[in-house]
Image (tube, rainbow, N blue to C red):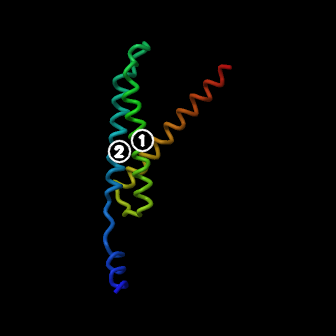
Amino acid sequence: MNDILDHDFENTPQGSTFAKMSFGMAMFTLCMFGYILARYSGKVRADDFAHLWIFTSITQFSILMGLIFSVVSMVRREKLRFIKGVGIGLNFFFFFLVLGAIGFAMWMDGMGE
């Protein structure tokens, strides 16, 4: 009896829910990066950046959630499709871009001493 139940359980198709969520978070992060760059790239005064922390924290949260969804999608072994590949690629790119920016800022801060 357990054989029959195990056989049916193994043949159930894996959905691509986490791959789609990963792709959605990657597109949301891309939109947030675009908005921040388009809106605040020409600003040079410090008071103009007073409310920018909201957008940067939302962007950081979406990068983290996209990375989590990408890892869960890989662990669940969802089928490799275009959406999954692009979502995983962009989320890891954004993550390493932020890590590189943090490392570069720390390196430049240490150069001034």
Q: Position of residue 28 (x, y in %)?
A: 33, 40
CA distance separating discs 2 and 1: 7 Å
Q: Earlier in the sequence, mark 2 or mark 1?
A: 2
Q: Amino acid at mark 2?
A: Met
Which quadrant of the figure has residue 82? bottom left
* Mark 2–mark 1 CB contact (< 8 Å): yes
Q: Residue at x 54, y 33 (%)?
A: 102
Residue behind mark 1: 63
- Mark 2 falls on what kind of element? helix
Which residue lies most toward the front here? 1
Dot 1: few (<14), some (14–19), or many (≥20) neighbours within 10 Å? many
Q: According to the image, label 2 marks what residue?
A: 25
At 68% from the left and 20% from the top, the residue drawn is 113
Q: Is residue 67 left or right of residue 7?
A: right
Q: Secondary structure at mark 1?
A: helix
In what quadrant of the picture does the N terminus appear? bottom left
**Quarter of the view holding residue 12:** bottom left
Tell me which residue sits at (35%, 81%) in the image: 7
